[in-house]
Each structure stands twice: as structure tokens, then as C-alpha cells.
Image (cartoon, grey):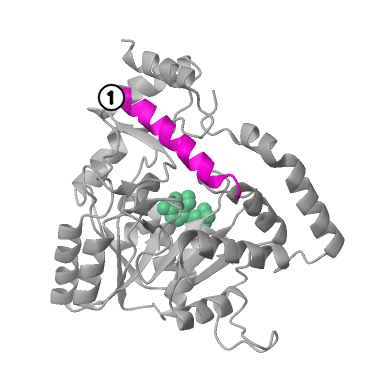
Amino acid sequence: MEFLDLKTQQKRFRKPLEKRINKILDHGAYIMGPEVFELEQKLADYCGVKHAISCSSGTDALLIPLMAWGVGPGDAVFTTPFTYVATAEVISILGATPVFVDVYESTYNIDCDKLEIEINKVIKKGKLKPKAIIPVDLFGLPARYRLVDKIAKKYNLKVVEDAAQSFGGSIRDKKVGTFGDIAATSFYPAKPLGCYGDGGAIFTNDDSLAEECKAIRIHGTKKDKYNSEMIGLNGRLDSIQAAVLLEKLSIFDEELEMRNIVNDNYRKYLNNAQYHPKEYQSAHALFSIVLGSNEKRNTLINRLQKNKIPSVVYYKLPIHLMKAFEYLGYKKKDFPVSENLSQTIVSLPMHPYLTRADIDCIFETIQTK
Ligand SMILES: Cc1ncc(COP(=O)(O)O)c(C=O)c1O
């Protein structure tokens, strides 16, 4: 059994993908070729946003908007410690300060009551200027954007949706990519929509912000390729990766539905998974369960391993306890919900091609004492 089965998926579009790649080999526009622009139009249409800007990774997709707003030293950017390190890393790279906020015990996404408390603490201290919030749509489930947006408006903060894991998700009829001022997704191969290398995209309805992001993506250049107007990056997506994404996008909705069925099948057996509020549609990037203790989790992981069932712990260390973030001065017990999750959570195989028999086998293994 595979944790993620990309081989079965590839069989579905290998021929048309080879055709697309051959076309690229013929036209030779490897960087910013026609496939990139075709993909951007399709991504924008898919989400229902004005601008989809492809880029080199999910990390750069988060970094670029922060650069466009001039986020830097003296600025506070609020996010959670229970996420992939990239979410906080982009804040630190710019010299700004990540201010962590614990997550809800049920959804593992940013706790909006605690968010407002942390913002007020920063204001009271007076050392940092609250600048932006990066809510993370963990495991594919969108964060509570209605509340996040309310808080952002109240304190005049920007919002970057970290949609690295949630492309394809939605709240009511609003798709991921349309929340906050701007959204950032990842096309890392393991993501619900992944390419065969690194890749990402930025989504926004703001015309001038989109222009700035496009410029930053190509070394801060606008009209003149050799006259940078601002400090930027080499943040482009390759044409070949765009071709992979175009093929995958053509079966994406069907795969989302298949992920939905896998999720439903798991939930027939297991009631200790992430809570999905009514009207919130997850992209089901991962399926994780929480055990009663660290010991119970480790016992289960060993049992799964013995039965050749792969599992992964996302995330074994919350970011505030990582060595690289020691300089922020956080300590153990600062974020009890995140810390407890990191000790007790485990992700089970999740992909569209997981069969009912696979899930039965996983459940039997979980049940065995
Ligand atoms: C929540 C989150 N944010 C950001 C990223 C960074 O994306 P990438 O690996 O494409 O740079 C990831 C990737 O795993 C992620 O899961």
C-alpha cells in the first residue's frame, strides 16, 4: 500500500502529457512558455479569481506577497506553530517577526479568539507593528475566513491564505484561493494538485498587487527585463511543470470527489479525525487521526509498519520548538494545543486511488490489540 499513489494517477494521462512535453521540446520556451500562461488562465477560472500567478514553489508564493507589501524588520506577522516550517520561514527571511497563535483542538486551524488576544498583546507591548496574518488551511481544510477577515479589518492587517494544502477546497460556494487579500498554494508533488518538481501559485483579485507580485517573481522587473524596479526573486514556474499541471487539472475535480469518498469511508470507522465544519469542503490533502497519548500513537505506528501500512507524522515538532526559531524566545507549553497534537497525531494513507479494501485493512490493523 502506498501513502500517496502517483503511479496509478500517471497512467491516466501519460500519453497526452508526453505529447505536451514533446511540444515544449519543439518550441523551446522552457521558461514562461505558452503552457505557463494557459495554466494561469485555467487556475484563475477554476478558483473564480482575477489573477493566478504561477511561481517556483509554495514557499515563494507566500514570500512574494509579503515582499510586495514591504513586510520587514519591526513587523509582526501572525500564524500558527502547527504547520509546515515554510509558513513561518518566509516571515523570518524578511526580518519580520512571526507571532504564533495556537490552533483549535477540533480543526487544527488558527484559533480566532487567541488571534485577537495575540494582536492586542503585540499592540500593548508596542515593540512590533502588527502587519499581516497567515492562516493555514491545514490538511486541506480552509481556516475560518469570516472571522479572520473581521479581525484583519478591525486591526488593519493584510491576510495571506496559506493554501499550500487546500487547493480545491471551499467554504460554501467560495473556492480556496479567494480568501484574504491573496492566497498562496503549492504544487509540490504530494499536494492535491502537484507537479513533478517544485511549483506554486498566487491568487488575488487585486490588480495592482498582482502586478507587483508578477514583477517580484521575475527579479523585480516590469517592462524592461534588464532594469529591475524593485528587489525580486527568480520565482518562475517552468513550462514543463505547467504542462504536468494542465494534465492533472483536467482530472482534478474527479480526483477530489474520489478523495471525498476515501474520507467518507475512513470516517465510517474512525471518529478521531479533523473536524470539518458544515459547509467547509476540504481538499483532503491528508487524513490524520489523533490518539489518546504519544505512547498510543507510537504503538499504532509500529503496528501499521509491521503490516506494511505507511503512516507519517505531520508535524512532530511545532515550529516554536524548532532550533531555527529559538531566537523568538518561545518555550514548551506556550501553545498547548499544537504541542499536544504534535505528540498524538498521525496521518494515514490518503490519495484518490485508495480502495475500500485498503481502508478495511487499515482499520483492521488499527483495531487489533
Ligand atoms: C502549509 C504549507 N505551507 C507552505 C508550504 C511550502 O510549499 P513548497 O514546498 O511548495 O515550497 C507547504 C508545503 O508542504 C505547506 O504544507
**Could you tell me which residue is drawn at 61 percent across and 78 percent down?**
219
Relative to 206, 11 lies left or right = right
The x, y position of residue 238, in whole percent, is 68, 61
What amino acid is at disc 1? Glu
Determine if residue 55 is in view.
no
Q: Is residue 145 magenta?
A: no
Tell me the quarter of the picture where residue 89 sits.
bottom left
Which part of the image, by quadrant, shows the N terminus? top right
Kindly state the secondary structure of the residue where label 1 is placed: helix
Tell me the quarter of the picture where residue 56 sits.
bottom right
Say if 34 sits above or below 289 in the image.
below
Q: Please name the residue that numbered disc 1 is placed on.
A: 295
The x, y position of residue 330, in whole percent, is 25, 57
Say if 215 sits above or below 99 in the image.
below
Say if 180 sits above or below 208 in the image.
above
**Could you tell me which residue is drawn at 28 percent across and 33 percent down?**
344
Which part of the image, by quadrant, shows the C terminus? top left
Q: Is residue 266 magenta?
A: yes
Q: Residues within 10 Å of mark 1 (few under 14, many from 20)?
A: few
Q: Start and end of the magenta stretch?
A: 250-268
**Could you tell me which residue is drawn at 36 percent across and 78 percent down?**
73
